[in-house]
Amino acid sequence: SMAVANTHIRKNWNAKMAEKAKHRQVKTKENNLVQARIEEKRERKRIAEERKKKKELNALKSAIVQPVSTNTVKKMSRKQLRAVRKMDVNSEINPAPIQKTKGLNGKVKI
């Protein structure tokens, strides 16, 4: 009879542990890269949000404010009402955010 060589020769314990350690190192490196990418994305998102807030604040500061009476607002068409914003003009320290309004409550046109 013919002897067949065993193709699945088991690795010894030290080789198996070394391979496991190497695999663990690769996994931790991969996780670190993923976390770094996530942090970078969060940072970019935060910066974009800050930029957007700053832009809105600058738009609010440079806005041309014109008071509009309720009677005028009632006569406006829908297209004109879209341009109307309601805001607190008196508070310079903490101005209210610009809000779109349907018209009747709007007192300020930008």
Image (tube, rainbow, N blue to C red):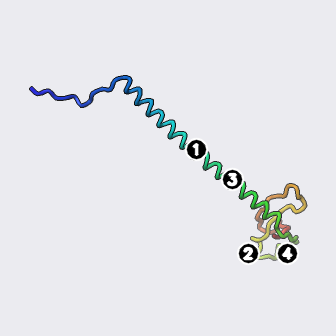
Locate residue 23 relative to residue 4 in the image: left or right: right
Q: CA distance from mark 3 to mark 4?
A: 41 Å
Could you say where residue 50 lies in the image, as x and y percent from the top left?
72, 54
Query: Earlier along the polypeptide chain: callout 3 or callout 1?
Result: 1
Please give the label number shown on residue 72: 4
Instruction: Residue at 76% x, 75% y: name it.
Output: 80
Residue 62 at x, y percent in the picture: 82, 66
Structural distance between the alpha carbons of marks 2 and 4: 14 Å
In the rendering, at what x and y percent does residue 75 appear? 82, 76
Of the two numbered discs 1 and 2 in the rendering, the one whose residue sits closer to the viewer = 1
Q: Report which residue position mark 2 lands on.
A: 79
- Residue at 77% x, 62% y is 99
Determine which residue is flagged by label 1: 36
Which residue is at 74% across, 57% downward?
53
Mark 3 residue type: Ile
Select label 3 or label 4 by which is in front.
3
Q: CA distance from mark 1 to mark 4?
A: 55 Å
Q: Which amino acid, mark 2?
A: Lys
